[in-house]
Image: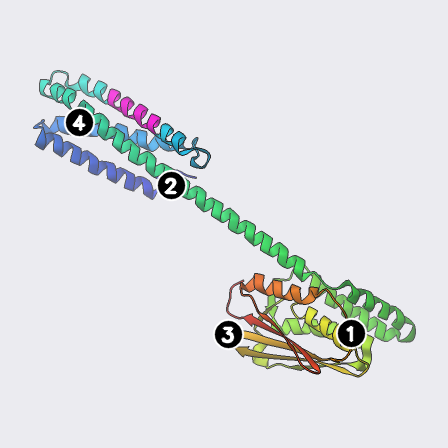
Amino acid sequence: MKHPFKGQGFIYYILAWAIIIVAHAMVLNLSYQLPLKISISDAVVCNLLLAGLGFSLWWAIQYFKPSNQSVLSMMSTFAVIVVLGTFSVSFICDTLLYQIYSDQAQYMAFSANVKPWRLVTSGLYLSVIILVYYLLKNSFSLSEKEKQEAELQTMLKQSELEMLKFQINPHFIFNSLNSISSLTISDPDNAREMVIKLSSFLRGSLGQENTETHSLQAELEQMNLYLDIEKVRFGDRLKVNQQIDKELLSLQVPNMILQPLYENAIKYGVYEQLDAVTIDTTCTLENSRLVIKVSNDYDSNAAVQKGKGIGLKNVRSRLEIIYGFPDLVTLERGKDKFCVKLEIPQGITI
């Protein structure tokens, strides 16, 4: 930490001591009837010594960290610095002024009588300066600690978000590769197209250049690649319907936030039925929140596959970490429809 009385602070420091010097000289001249020249000399010499010592004490204070000291130890250090500084200034001040005004009996008598008060006043000045230094140093330490904690929290948040974002179900990749393997024999052109789409999808989802959020349009384009790949696997059994106003496409959403929803819709919808399953996606703007609903047909009488629920937990965790609000994910289960609703706040700086 730089000296607090450097730059503009130094100007204020000098002005404060100038006021003290003027007040000191006026008291000696008016109250003690000392000649103006002697009054000014006494005020200037003694207070400039105190000002210089007070300014230099900052570097001495750097060796003492309040956070590493007990209250008693800090007070003892404080008292030692004040006492040594006070007697040093008093000795130097008396030595200089005695040499100059040794023939002035009035001043010599005055100096002897007010010496205790001079010591007390000097000690008070130095105490105030040291206390200010301690307070500034402690305030700076707390500020730095808070800054470091904030940076650490940001790093942890980003690390957790990256971990959550990259939790793509490996079964999707395995199944896609198996489908590609089969298509290379039966339909090479379709296999080639699927490889290109899978490559584009993985590049977009795992690319390091991505920011935490992007537009709804970019998210849907990425998800359409995902769904196109799944359509190759399931054929006519998978249908996709999207109802989204163009005005909403520029709104911001987290990267890959919809992928776990579509993955669940396929896992618990298409896998469970022989009939065609439609995955519907609707978007609306309600109370400054983008509301996205992803629903799919499902057979409520079919035996439900047991899963770990990692996908939806992932989505909940990411939204809460990014936006700071809980309950942004709602599940709606009907007789033949299952719907996941996301509420994504808008106008929040990430």
Label 2 and label 1: CA atoms lie apart by: 62 Å
In which image quadrant can residue 172 be found? bottom right
Instruction: Identify the element where label 2 is drawn.
Output: helix
In which image quadrant can residue 337 be found? bottom right
Q: In x, y percent, where is residue 192?
A: 84, 71
In the rendering, which numbered label is found on residue 41?
4
In the rendering, which numbered label is found on residue 252?
none
Reading the image, the residue beneath label 1 is 230
Instruction: Identify the element where label 4 is drawn.
Output: helix
Q: Nearer the viewer, mark 4 or mark 1?
A: 1
Q: Can you say whether 151 is above or below 232 in the image? A: above
Q: In x, y percent, where is residue 282?
A: 63, 80
**Kind of residue at badge 4:** Ser
Query: In the rendered structure, which disc, 2 or 4, sits on the residue that comes first in sequence?
Result: 4
In the rendering, which numbered label is found on residue 136?
2
How crowded pointer 3 is (Cα within 10 Å; few <14, some 14-19, many 20+) is rated as few
How crowded pointer 2 is (Cα within 10 Å; few <14, some 14-19, many 20+) is rated as some
Reading the image, the residue beneath label 3 is 288
Quadrant location of the C terminus in the rendered image:
bottom right
